[in-house]
Image: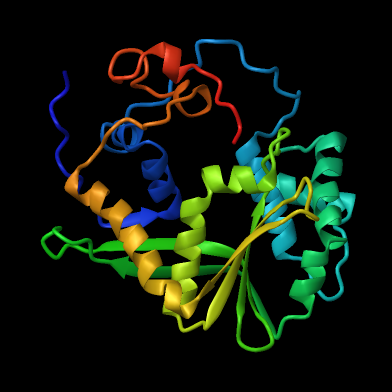
Amino acid sequence: MLARPRALPVSRLSYTGLEDYRRCSYRFYLEKALRLPPVAAPFAAEPLPETGIGGLLRGSLVHQLLERLDFRRPLAPSEADVAALGESHGVQLTPEEIADLRDMVDRFTGSVLRERIARARRVRTELPFAYTLVPPGAGGRSVLVNGVVDVHAVEDGGGLLVVDYKSNPLEGREPEELTADHYSTQRIVYALAALRAGAPRVEVVHVYLEEPERPTSVTYEAGDADRLEADLLQLARGVVEGRFEPTSEPHAELCATCPGRAALCSWDEEHTLSVRTPA
């Protein structure tokens, strides 16, 4: 049996790190502290489409295309523009990949959300933020939480609209279900950044570029700031104090590639390789 892990010397956390900790703090420990790499899933995955770019680069490319978008006078990027962007990353995009990237931008361009952003008083894209948290019982040690928002739009009345683009496929899942499962911590991190900066209210929107007409959103008021901070402090406190336990809800999507699944986890494969029934 492994000895209880010591507290990490954590001084900086992104929302992805906090989200990883929320989903399974023990896997977070194995990968972030022990630097154990993910393992291959013990079953055959669905065949991937034949493409020269993976999901991460695909997401980076479409984010860059959307960063260039004029929300009030939107124009879809040309094939030559997309090809040149790929070349700037050292890849030769196929015609299918170029069409895929253009389609994502085009779908968002025609969405109600894009029109709403166009009506905002002030819009900034790729806006970085950072703030500190001081977890109780951490001896005064603070944690810097940082990140970047895709769209930061100040609307009439002073309310703030924060938009995060998602290029990953829904694969039959509802947008709200996927957001709650994978990006609930991101919502809190973004909302608290906005409220700490003085926004009277903030609406955090996740838009899946596969179906931009079905965005998910949650609105927070200034009075929610203390509750949001308490939620984040609880997560950050666990990281700083070294509380790393296997998830209470193991399933294949989360556990199949975990480096501890075969021998280090307290859950057996009946649980870690199970298919979770959507809520």
Q: Residue at x 88, y 65 (%)?
A: 75
Q: Residue at x 77, y 65 (%)?
A: 113
| 168 over 142 or under it: above or below | above
Instruction: Choose between 146 and 184: the one closer to the eye.
Output: 184
Residue 125 appears in the rendering: yes
Quarter location, residue 92: top right
Q: Is residue 90 visible?
A: no
- Residue 213: image location, x then y, percent: 80, 55
* Residue in view at x 37 percent, y 36 percent: 24
Quadrant where the C terminus is found in the figure:
top right
Where, by quadrant of the figure, is residue 136 drawn? bottom left
- Provide residue 204's location: percent of width, then percent of height: 59, 65
Along the horizontal axis of the image, is 35 left or right of 202? Answer: left
**Residue 223: % across, % down:** 44, 78
Q: Is residue 255 above or below residue 166?
A: above
Total residue callouts: 0
